[in-house]
Image (spheres, coloured by chain):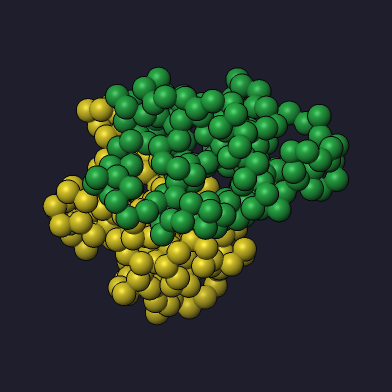
Chain colours: A yellow, B green
Amino acid sequence: MSFRFGPLIIPQSQVFMVSRLSYGLVNLKPAVPGHVLVVSRRPVTRFNDLSADEVTDLFQQGQRVSRLVERVYKADSLALVIQDGKEAGQSVPHVHLHILPRRKADFANNDDIYDELGSRKRVRGVDNDERVPRSAEEMAREAELLRSELGEWSSDASTLSDGRAST
Amino acid sequence: MSFRFGPLIIPQSQVFMVSRLSYGLVNLKPAVPGHVLVVSRRPVTRFNDLSADEVTDLFQQGQRVSRLVERVYKADSLALVIQDGKEAGQSVPHVHLHILPRRKADFANNDDIYDELGSRKRVRGVDNDERVPRSAEEMAREAELLRSELGEWSSDASTLSDGRAST
């Protein structure tokens, strides 16, 4: 099983959730701890390109994942953001929902995260050049934790939780 | 038919879309032209409080409304944002999806809108004190335009498009 994210192929070690039409991906350069993405499995660019089924699955799973990261990262709130198209700061041309657990005082100004998420000068989604990328090992550890908390497949199992063979 | 938005009762003149579980609301202080909200009809605070049906309806309608405002406001992109909880800058304690049509150069720095949407010092959602509120007439005119473009009920009709009597 492989996971496309725009032009990229994402290793399964970085994926913590797989549903019929979406998957959950840890972040190379999270803006806050637990900043994850829920991505449509079909590689389309714009929100409007999603079918009704894909919209439903993305946000049902988005709700499930938001509940997960709020609990695991001991947050009080969440930001949910889709940068839908280039003029909205979308960096990877593939529909993805940012989910960011928020805690009191996680930024000096509580709302700077929107600047952090949005500013071209600083950070844009997952592929900015100014935040230090994490190691593959760190990302795999986080994905394993989230997978385990979510009751998804374990990285040492040969099958995903829904019985599909992993590759 | 009345529409709650947190502690507020929204006049129908400001509502441009009504579905089974959601409604579309024009903005008192839009960050950009066409900045609208899709609101759950049941007044709950957090995204996680929504039922599966409510999540589906909110984002199916969100997709429909995003297509509408992108076309009507001649935009190229969209920002979709939920500030879910106080620490994420949520100002009205009632789940609402911000939909913002984006165009090239609508802000001097294209991504300043996230700061505009997020910053406590400047603008937070719909109830900040620093942006000049629009008149009820201007809001009603915009809602009428969007309603008409969407094929919803007309303000001079006595019934909504789904046949319910308006009040």
- Residue A2, given in percent of the width and then of the height, sits at 39, 76
Q: Establish if B84 lies above or below B135.
A: below
Regarding residue A148, the answer to whether it shows in the image is no
Q: Is B41 situated left or right of A29 in this image?
A: right
The N terminus of chain A sits in image quarter? bottom left
**How many numbered callouts?**
0
Q: Establish if B2 lies above or below A49.
A: above
The C terminus of chain A sits in image quarter? bottom left
- Residue A97, given in percent of the width and then of the height, sits at 43, 54
Q: Is B41 situated left or right of B94 in this image?
A: right
Quarter holding residue B108: top left
Residue drawn at 74 percent across, 38 percent down: B155
Which of B55 and A86 lies nearest the eye of the viewer? A86
Q: Is B13 situated left or right of A120 in this image?
A: right
Q: Establish if B11 lies above or below B84.
A: above
Quarter holding residue B160: top right
- Residue B65, given in percent of the width and then of the height, sits at 58, 51
Regarding residue A87, the answer to whether it shows in the image is yes
Residue drawn at 62 percent across, 33 percent down: B140
Residue drawn at 52 percent across, 58 percent down: B71
Which of A71 and A24 lies nearest the eye of the viewer? A24
Q: Establish if A48 lies above or below B21.
A: below
